[in-house]
Image (cartoon, grey):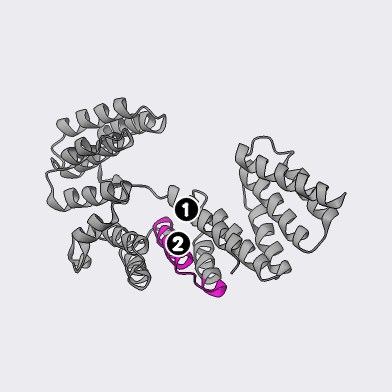
Amino acid sequence: MRVDVWYALWKLVHDMKKLIPTFLLISSVISTLNAGYITERTAAMELMTAGKNQEAAEAFITSAEATTNDLQHADALTNAALCLQRLKRNEEAMALVAKIRSVPLRESAELDLLKGARNWKCVMDKTKDKDLSAWPEKVIFQAYLARGQAETALGQHKDAEVDLLRAQEFTVSPNNKAISWALIAENAVRAKADSQKLLDIYAKICALKPSGGIHQRALVARAKLFLDTNQYEQALAEVAALEAMPSIQAQWLCTAQINYGDIYAKQGKVVEALACYKKALTIPTAAPETLKEAQTKASALENTAK
């Protein structure tokens, strides 16, 4: 696999990871929380999303102090800690999760913070040689993901794949399973796996039809892999599947046109490629960096054609 293709795939799985909720434990049990708490949580999350981390942390702490429910208490303190971590107040964040009453939920929150800090050695110290399947049911999926991510980062690729696959046994959510496959894809890219293995992994993600952009990124990854091996019809089919997705966002329409352009350009079809890059530029609501990519490729092709 060419270095540029390897980097493109690494970038795709890196972007996928941004879509993974930091606290999978809490999202998996949200239906067990009471309506009043969910209302408070939603308001605090809006502050968090808006980048108002100090205000969000204070709101979560207030909720934690007002509840006797262990799940709500853990959820609130965990999210408050995440806000503090975003403010680079890591010691305060760890001190907050230390107050979580439930021991397994506390350990799970500590893993989340360690992951957020990319402290993979400590993640391994907390999980190495432990039978994670014996942990409380609601934290097992997240625990396996955490250890798998740590193993990937530390170059223990075989162990990482085993743990990330095992995680899927403890969730029924298609999105959670897709998250696991996305992390397996990252592990495979880092391990310099062959193209067919990566194609199969991305196909697993597509079959799950997850939300949040993971499905779209998997289609793009498959298109790039087919393009790398000069399988142009298959590459075009993946991009067409992306373009045909219902209610597709402008960002993905723009991405589709750029990928069409890449496929035609590699075949020497300059006119068709240039038309695709220019069509991408007619989608002004796409991300600025995506429009910049389209402009750069269009300009380079025009200069080559002169």
**Amino acid type indicated by mark 1:** His
Circle 1 Cα neighbour tier, 10 Å, few/some/many (<14 / 14–19 / ≥20): some
- Element at badge 1? helix
Our reading of the magenta stretch's main secondary structure is helix
**Amino acid type indicated by mark 2:** Glu
Q: Is residue 136 visible?
A: no
Cβ–Cβ under 8 Å for marks 2 and 1: yes
Q: Quadrant of the N terminus?
A: bottom right
Please state the extent of the stretch shown in magenta in the rendering: 175-197
- Left/right of residue 196 with respect to residue 233 in the rendered view: left
Q: Position of residue 208 (x, y in %)?
A: 49, 62
**Residue 186 tag number:** 2
- Left/right of residue 229 with respect to residue 132 in the rendered view: right
Q: State the residue lying farthest toward the top.
A: 55
Q: Is residue 224 above or below residue 261?
A: below
* Count of number-bearing discs: 2
At x 25%, y 27%, the residue is 58
